[in-house]
Image (cartoon, rainbow, N blue to C red):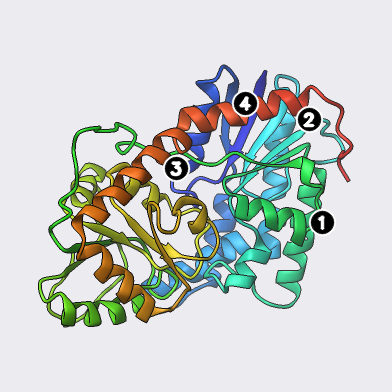
Amino acid sequence: MKLVGISPATIFSGFENSFFDAIEQQGLTIDRRQVEVPWFKAWCTLTSFHPVKKLWGTRRDLHYHTTARAFNVKSAAAQRIVAMSKDSANAIYQVGALWNPLSTTNELPLILHVDYTSLLSRKRNSEWKRKEGFEQDYWIEQERKLYQSSAIVLTTTENARQSIVHDYGIPKEHVVTVGAGVSSPYDTFDEDRLPDYSSRKILFVGKGFKGKGLDTLLDSFSEVRKVIPGAELTFVGPTELSVDMEGISYLGRIADRNQVRELYYDHALFVMPSRFEPLGQVFLEAMSCKLPCIGTTVDAMPEMIKHGDSGLLIEPGDSQRLTEHIIRILGQPELAREMGLRGFSRLKSEYTWEVVGKKITDTIRYKMGKPSSMGPT
């Protein structure tokens, strides 16, 4: 079976290639294409001007990825790509719901792979929430039509699957959770190496401030230091951080993934109390290094972190409970070790690209071999 694989160039940080690679390793062929519209990106850059460079970039990205015009412009570009490939492919495999590649002249079935929905973004008040009013209503309706028109909708999390089924009214038999794998270099599992559970060091790796719960973590850490004076907190990521507090190290963005991997092993606990999280690849990275994790009870985090088993969960913004959890784990290195090892074992059985690739290809082969009640609308 040959697929034409279409995806954005940047928004998923190369994650889409992991799905493509995993599928090809299972024997399917993918003609990889990116849906990018340079003239439209230039237009978004000009019309989003702001004297603060960072805000200018954020406004441009929102215009380029989340507006009604963006959906329509990219849909036209995707349809042109499909038209050039339709005679040599059996189906379309699309990562993300940022456009509709189907047209009246295209008879290829669509396999759609998503990690989040617009209605989840609105519910969680995420940074990628569509502008309220026409833009948001239009996008949600186009998203619904896209789900309805797909032969299969694959999701990286059960959280996304439940939203598509219940929020968008898509029959549950047409939506399948296939998961995601941990990427290189974290997929080269070191069975014998352990983190320094006695270090009393906490690690945060992520982009964003309030959305990732950094405010909650900072409030909590000041209380943790009162009980564990030697506790340390390390931040890694492009988020600008200026905090005058004992025990905090801000390393900024680190491009070398092997260097970041060493940091996981140098700490006793990973914490990211996000207010929304489509997947949270960093939790998988921490688990691959046998670190216990603390996240929150929303979105995909409870799927990855089994509360009381491989880590602990809090309600978003609950700094008091986060303080209690951090003190508990840092104060019991053996408990940290037990949680870390259980998370590592689960990661190897559920979150590798070999496992995920097999789920995807098995689902495609099964579903594509049966007549679908969901044709293009």
Q: Earlier in the sequence, mark 2 or mark 4?
A: 2
Figure label count: 4
- Is 38 left, or right, of 252 in this rendering? right
Q: Say which of marks 1 and 2 sits in front.
A: 1
The CA distance from mark 3 to mark 1 is 30 Å
How far apart are the two marked residues, 4 and 1, measured between alpha carbons? 25 Å
Residue 169 marker: 1
Nearest to N terminus: mark 4 or mark 1: 1
Badge 2 density bin: few <14, some 14–19, many ≥20, Cα 10 Å: many
Q: Secondary structure at mark 2?
A: loop
Could you tell which of marks 1 and 2 lies nearer the N-terminus? Answer: 2
**Mark 1 secondary-structure assignment:** loop
**Residue name at image x 52 percent, y 52 percent:** 303
The reply, left or right, for residue 50 in relation to residue 125 is: left
Residue under label 4, please give it: 361
Numbered disc 4: secondary structure: helix
Q: Which residue is mark 2?
A: 108
